Image: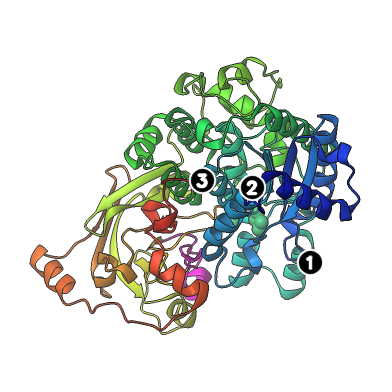
Amino acid sequence: MTSYGDQGFSLFLRKAFIKAMGYSDDALDRPIVGIANTYSDYNPCHGNVPQLIEAAKRGVMLGGALPMVFPTISIHESFASPTSMYLRNLMAMETEEMIRAQPMDSVILIGGCDKTLPAQIMAAASSDIPAVFLPTGPMATGHHKGERLGACTDCRRFWGRFRAGEIDEAEIGEVNNRLVSSVGTCTVMGTASTMANLTEVMGLCLPRAGSAPATEAERVRLSEATGSLAAKLASEGGPTVKELLTPAAIRNGLVALQAMGGSTNAVVHLAAICGRLGIPLDMALLDELGRRVPLLVDLQPSGQHYMEQFHKAGGVPALLKEIRGELDLNAPTIHGASIGEVIDAVVDEPGQTIIRSMAAPLKPIGTLAVLKGNLAPRGAVIKQSAASKALMQHSGRAVVFDSVEDLANRIDSDDLDVAADDVLVLRNAGPKGAPGMPEAGYLPIPRKLARQGVKDMVRISDARMSGTAFGTVILHISPEAAAGGPLAIVQNGDRITLDVPGRVLNLDIAPAEFERRMVALPPPAETARRGYDRLYHEHVMQADEGADFDFLQAGPLP
Ligand code: FES
Ligand code: MG
């Protein structure tokens, strides 16, 4: 810490100020646990944070340390413009610097909505004090006409039915009241659930903290226990996130990602986290694991159910038990047990059908596949577990949209020249293009085709997709069009070939023509920018590098 003259005076001055808050010498003379407060009126996914903080503080004090709560940015998916992803790196930078700037011996990071846990893990990976994570937990499900509803796979399903004219204005209004029935994160295996579960798989939170519902007492007790653990870490001085996130822990994360039906967004976040550690994310390994590790978890959007059922079926420890043959069981955790010991402590839930076995998986393939080809020289990702089988090998005519705005303007036009076996192409929607790599990759089915009953088409883009969406959607094409990637040269009517089993995404034009179009691409337009927008555009990297800022990669700590 900065010194005001001599060390003794620095402590004297800080104590004088903090005593204004009513702290005694007895309270101050002990290890300090920082607790990041991400509560915000704009963030319903973090609506239980005040209660979790109360419980965490109790745990810290039971553990003999002093809790100090401090605010950080909070990002909700629906209320962050232009996109939440645009702000993820800002939250990561702010959280990292606040951990470093303020006196604390360990830190509890409470997050949940899609970008928040990734930002916090990135921050902690670049810090040198122990950090314990506490996901906010999944929301409760709602009900409509005898059906269970979960945000936000069912948001899309019902909106699709409304667009197709199957349900009316009054009914969609009723559904709107019931889709998000409590605070907490989206209850399907979207990005928030995926990242919370991965936090647990990679040993960064307590067992069951990845999946315990936001509204249940267990979540609050986990928070208290997280506080006690953080107090212990504060006096013992370790381990740090950097020490826990070994290549073995990351590999375990990739295995679990494939087995759980995890979100494509997790690939971008894991790449960013790995970048902070100086170990590039091994996309070939991710793909290879997807050929070997089948989908075991029956949750939407790849399957049927919701996080509360996953939790009651045993949650992450039960999943780890099923995939134990693929895991490094010696990988350490923040709570001291190895992953093998976490598995040994699993009490089976008889009769549960949510977490399947390797011998009888939900689907024989893994969740994610990594595609390459002349359209995606540095890769693209598809969530094959949530795609249509009939479209996995498909060749079709390109129907190109130049931007998210162009898509919005024309997709529902009756004049749009489009047929069900065409390939919808969206570009300029990557990290630099939109900017912030919006979740626009789930292009809607053109209205005139939706009315004919078309439910899925091949859709390709440099954008991301909500982890809660379903369809044959190819994402994260790298490099993106706005960075001079070949997606920029696709023309209406070109043929595009997708071969998921062969891992290929190609533009079927002659090499000479391909080359001619690439050379003819205009240089990116220069735009005058200021503030964060300028920082973002000058430093954001591509999707395969996690879309982190180049200067935040692994390096010496200040
Ligand atoms: Fe926050 Fe889905 S909107 S987790
Ligand atoms: Mg999401």
Rendered residue at 62%/65% (across/down): 161
- Residue sitting nearer the eye, 137 or 332: 332
Q: Nearer the viewer, mark 1 or mark 3?
A: 3
- Report the predominant secondary structure element of the magenta stretch: loop
Instruction: Examine the rendered structure and indicate whether residue 432 appears above or below residue 109.
Output: below
Q: Secondary structure at mark 1?
A: helix
Residue picked out by circle 3: 126
Residue 483, which numbered label?
Answer: none
- Residue sitting nearer the eye, 408 or 43: 43
Magenta segment range? Answer: 436-457
Using the rendered view, name the quadrant where residue 25 is placed. top right
Residue picked out by circle 2: 188
Indicate the amino acid at tag 1: Glu
- Cα distance, mark 1 to mark 3? 45 Å
- Cα distance, mark 3 to mark 2? 30 Å
Rendered residue at 55%/24% (across/down): 332
Q: How many marks?
A: 3
Splitting the image into four quadrants, where does ligand 2 fall? bottom right
Q: Is mark 2 within 8 Å of ligand 1?
A: no
Residue 89 pos. (x, y %): 52, 59
Indicate the amino acid at tag 3: Ser
Residue picked out by circle 1: 174
Residue 30 lies in the magenta-colored region:
no
